[in-house]
Amino acid sequence: MIMLRSVCKRAFFSVPKRPIASLAQPWLHACAGPVPDVLAVRYAPVKGRRFYSQSPSGPNMNAWVSPDAQPAGANLKKFTVDLTQKAKDGILDPVIGRDEEIRRMIQILSRRTKNNPVLIGSAGVGKTALAEGLATRIVDGLVPDSMKNKIVLSLDVGSLVAGTSMRGEFEARLKGILKDIEKDKDQYILFIDELHLLVGAGQAEGGNMDAGNMLKPALARGEIRCVGATTLDEYRKYIEKDAALARRFQSVYVAEPTVEDAISILRGIKERYEVHHGVRIADGALVAAAQLSHRYITDRFLPDKAIDLIDEAASRLRLQQESKPEQVEAQEKKIIQLKIEREALRQESDKASKQRLTTLESDLAAREKEFNQLVGQWQAEKRKLEEAKSFKQKIEAARRELDNAQRMGNWTRVAELNYSVIPHFEQQLAELEQQQQVAAASSAGGRLVSSTVTAEDIAAVIARQTGIPVASMVQTERDKILHLEDTLRSQVVGQEEAIHAVANAIRLSRAGLKSASRPISNFMFVGQSGTGKTLTVRAIAQALFNSADAMTVINMAELGDPQLSVSKLLGASAGYVGYEEGGLLTEPVRRRPYQVVLFDEFEKAHRNVQHVLLRIMDEGFITDGHGRKVDFRNTLIVLTSNLGSEALAAMPENTPRKVQKDAVMEAVREHCAPEFINRIDEIILFNRLTMKDMHAITELRIKEVAANLSDRGIGLKVDSLAKDWLSRRGFDPAYGARPLRRVLQQSLLSPLAVKMLNGDVPEGSTVQVTCNPVTADVVDLEQALQFTISPP
């Protein structure tokens, strides 16, 4: 031991450490001799690790250093992200507007104590972007002198909490971060996104202090500058109830930007998305993204929802560029089909097959030539797009270098970049785009690959998200709304006044002349059964949303219970049976907010339902059993009712329409409260059907049957006598046109189905239907019509 102390020049050396030291310090082998094998195996895991370091008191006093010790600032590097460095590297997106909010943040951060702003706003309005904007302004020097050279660090709460199952681990990490910041408190600004996550964090496994309580002393004394961000609901739920924590923060409310401000934001970040996706984004697409998202995506906020539309539309276009164009795929499939047919014909030896083979060979050669030309054009366009993307990336990199050179004061490089490098790349990009336009103009079929995101692309993205057809959002919507009467008239017969009233109300809403906080329209359809009320609703759904299925039907006869009627519509409250299932009304509207909502046979529901509908029809919102606001502003509300039908049935046919409507309105007033009637935009009385109307309805139904048969290659002709008989038998004064469907099924469809199953109606044949009016009324419906089959 004395020899080791003298040779190794160590002041302290204990016997148990000798085997470890001999492994960890190679120079000790010469002093201590060879190490026994048993010790080498025992201490192999620590071989190569350092256990001694030079003591500051002298070369002979070496203190032991833990291998788990963290160097200064290691906690900040491990658990935070340097936003200031990201801003220097040009990684952060520019922040457009928000000058007032950033100015308020800087004002609070400049206070002596309680210098901690908290950004409060809805998800997606740009709270995190404000912190990034602060970092960018610090880098650019656009802040007061007191804020210059500050470093904005974003706390990674997930990494901070991850793996802290043992008691004290989380506290040690957070304490280390606070200690590192306190060492140079005038330099660091700590940004905590989702601030509410820290409340309660660290209490796992018996911890008695959470992060919020640990932050309170440092926040109150001004030892750290902290910027928090959270939503209003979470601030109220987690932070505001802790008054001691809430008073240490100063609130900065971040409101949703207007559509005009959102368009400006999109214009500011457009280039970043163009460079990333390698496409060009038209200014019309930016305007459409802001306007359409504001109009149709009501459960999210600008600018986030508009940015998502731009990003997804650009991504979709980029995938289309990397995939085969439709023309190339169609030509390729056709070539494959012809090649299969060619191989089959080569097996045949008859003259017709040989002639067909000769024709096919020439056709195949022409198609292959055209296919090769299309593939060449596609590859050339792809190369041009890749070149354009490369130039945009070079321009973006040069602009980042320009910013850095300006900050460093390298004015020689600034001039070179500003007047030589960037203009050169921009000129090359402009020439390339000009070549693309010339190539597209010279090509007979135009460009195969689109390189520009347009308003139609934005509309297509919204259509997939909401289920609204693209045509209902772009220019064609105007034509559709202007000619809505013609569309409805092709399906609904005998209700001209109702069609006109519905079309006018929808046009009024679409023109923006009605309150945007109400549904599209609120209608009540009244009249006798079988006059076409429900059919009109389906026609409206088809006309507005291009699908008759874009409709939720609520059978009001199921809502007669005074205790359960409201909970069935909105969903049961917490703690009651059916809480997880949702409401019959709210769940379909939440999943598909653009549709027609039909309350069928409204008068059969309990009066409590009227109170629910009052708010929907007036404010456009309702709160479901889960406490969520359901948006009805993009729905069309229709209530159908048979109120007053008894009085109508007792009136003669020539009764004036005003008398009929007065009788119906009297029945409606008896059943509905005045405030409920005032919420209805139009109460529409459906006329009684006449025989003229029945002939038109019969004609429509026969056309539907003929269309179904034509899909099977079978024609159908029904003479005037048969149509007249079907109209008379299908009409009932009490039930309207409802019996017509039964008459058609029994007298036309059932006998025809038997003949088709027996093989009497081959494909390509025509079925002629007639009847004898004298005998048709005295025989069974199945035998009333006569069928003649014309062979193909």
Image: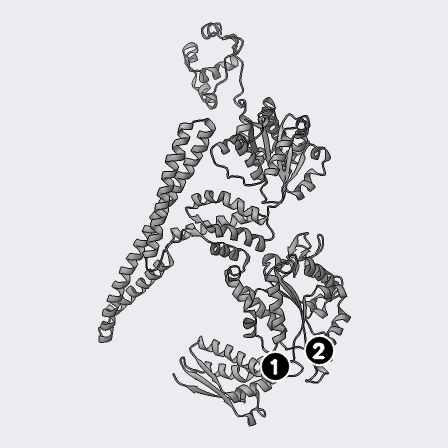
Q: Residue at x 58, y 52 (%)?
A: 294
Q: Residue at x 55, y 49 (%)?
A: 305
Which is nearer the eye, 175 or 67?
A: 175
Q: Identify the residue position indicated by label 2 in the image.
A: 658
* Quarter-of-image position of residue 412: top left
The quadrant in which the C terminus is found is: bottom left
Q: In the shown orientation, is residue 196 left or right of residue 321? A: right
> Mark 2 or mark 1, which is nearer the start of the sequence?
2
Amino acid type at circle 2 is Lys
Amino acid type at circle 1 is Pro
**Residue 193 visible in the shown view:** no
Q: In the shown orientation, is residue 82 left or right of residue 737? A: left
Q: Where is residue 495 in the image (x, y as percent from the top left)?
A: 61, 76
Label 2 residue SS: helix
The residue at the far bottom in this view is 774
Label 1 residue SS: helix
Q: Position of residue 225 (x, y in %)?
A: 62, 29
Q: Which residue is drawn at 63% across and 60% down?
A: 513
Residue 50's place in the image compared with 481, above or below, is above
Q: Residue 455 got which mark?
A: none
Which is nearer the eye, 626 or 114?
A: 114
Q: Identify the residue position indicated by label 1 in the image.
A: 739
